[in-house]
Image (spheres, coloured by chain):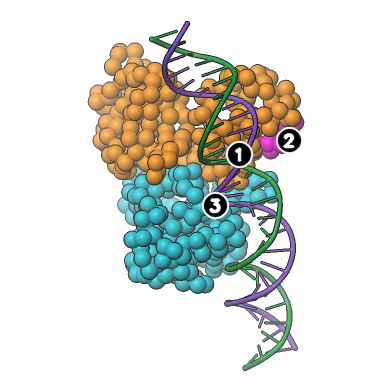
Chain colours: A orange, B cyan, C purple, D green
Amino acid sequence: MRESDIPTIRSLELFREMADDSFAELVRGAYVQNFPPNMELIVEGDACDFLHIVESGSVELLANWNGRETAMTILREGATFILAAAIRDAPNLMSARTLERSRIIMLPAEDVRRVFEKDHAFARAVVMELAYCYRGVIKGVKGLKLRSSIERLANYLLKWQKKSGGGARFLLSVEKRRLASILGMTPENLSRSIKALRPYGVVIEGQMVEISDPEKLADMAKPTPLIDDPRS
Amino acid sequence: MRESDIPTIRSLELFREMADDSFAELVRGAYVQNFPPNMELIVEGDACDFLHIVESGSVELLANWNGRETAMTILREGATFILAAAIRDAPNLMSARTLERSRIIMLPAEDVRRVFEKDHAFARAVVMELAYCYRGVIKGVKGLKLRSSIERLANYLLKWQKKSGGGARFLLSVEKRRLASILGMTPENLSRSIKALRPYGVVIEGQMVEISDPEKLADMAKPTPLIDDPRS
DNA sequence: CGTTCAATTGATCAGCGTCAAACTAGGTGG
DNA sequence: CCACCTAGTTTGACGCTGATCAATTGAACG
């Protein structure tokens, strides 16, 4: 861990409000480490020893069953993972692997639970974070059960257009095969879905997305804050 | 609210450990009410005014989009709902309706947030409950994305067999149309899936389920605690 | 410049949804 | 108490969405 890591950690929402001594106690046992791309950080089913936080880079959460694999979500700078498992001292439900070179903060789960017990501001932040994650997953389920794969793709594109500043062109920040998995479809199907969005003014070449007529696309995608708004 | 409600509420996990005066403060503003079946308790998108708890009966959480509807889960005695929305003071992501005559406890969300701020034991219980719910939804997503509908049904049956005491016969506690929606399929498809499980020793007549060869069924369903265990 | 892996394309197929109709059961009122 | 009515369930026929398999193109990297 570098000296410069400490203010970085402190500025994360989860740690911003807590008392100085609690923060010191948490950081004392922390590890911060760089990982190469494609590194397995956590394996589904293992005991949860550390709360993880992405300081930089990106991490994929994924799940396996019966030889199949699916991507659950992709985490970027500032995101925490396996908070629920750390708090409940339960086995991890998902695996985690780096997508690119990433710097990861690891806090011993036991420290987290102990500090959680005594620092109220931290407890509050943990609850807010957990509630936020919970609502995120609920939105994901709603998308999966209520929408077709083309509708999911269309709404995904609209969401990222907004996140990227709202311009007509922006870059996909995920490999297409992973995007497909996150959206709950095969890579082949994603390719075809992309072409199926052409009549709605969508062109994707490589990582470059162009949405020439957002109104028309939204007309078909019917985005709603109750599924597509990352905040709220 | 009846006098007898108070010890009932107090005995729920969420309130068991908190200080007496905090509990009194929470209960002071509480409503407890009987609702007939099929009553809309909460509408998706509305502001979250009350934390709800099922004292008896059962409640369905459901979601709508673009004219479609899906059941998210079914809650029974002791379950809380819209805790995340109450804590974050955010709009509800799901609607809720009673399935049968149900007695529901309603705590003003503002009281919950205030007591949460000052009572640490309560904060702890809230976090545990939230983490529990979060993990439940994650398991649901894993089932949806990694399993076929027949596999989901098979695992559902095994899970409820265990919950019902492990005997070869037990009763479905849900209407089949709702079960279908929860499992992410149509009622017609559920009917056919049930018949497709016949070779694995499953017979369902009305609400009565008989699993004559659980080994054989489990062999095909491949249940795992990381998806199917309600605890952990 | 070649190797490797992602992305695309086409052909085919399976799973599952839709529609329609028959059947069943539970509840209500005569 | 029975007959009817309504709503859930089942069954069959059909079609669409999306998965699978195979082959090709394309792009990144050593």
The magenta stretch spans residue A218: yes
In this rendering, the label closer to the viewer, 2 or 3? 3
Chain holding disc 2: A
Residue type at tag 1: Ser
Q: Depth check: A53 or B124 in front? A: A53
B16 vs A218: above or below: below
Residue A178 position within the rendered picture, expressed as x and y whole percent measured from the top left: 50, 29
Indicate the secondary structure of the residue bearing disc 2: helix
Q: Nearer the viewer, mark 1 or mark 2?
A: 1
Highlighted magenta segment, given as a residue range: A216-226
Disc assigned to residue A149: 1
Chain at numbered mark 1? A
Residue that appears at 69% across and 49% down: B67
Image x and y of residue D27, in percent: 54, 15
Q: Is B128 above or below relative to B190?
A: above
Q: Which residue is under mark 3?
A: B184
The part of the image, by quadrant, that contains residue A222 is: top right
Whole-Å distance between the Cαs marked 1 and 3? 15 Å
Q: Earlier in the sequence, mark 1 or mark 2?
A: 1
* Residue drawn at 34 percent across, 50 percent down: B225
Label for residue B183? none
- Tell me which residue sits at (39%, 48%) in the image: B227
Tag of residue A219:
2
Check if residue B175 falls in the magenta segment. Answer: no
Whether residue A38 is visible to the viewer of this picture, yes or no, is: yes
Q: Main secondary structure of the magenta part?
A: helix
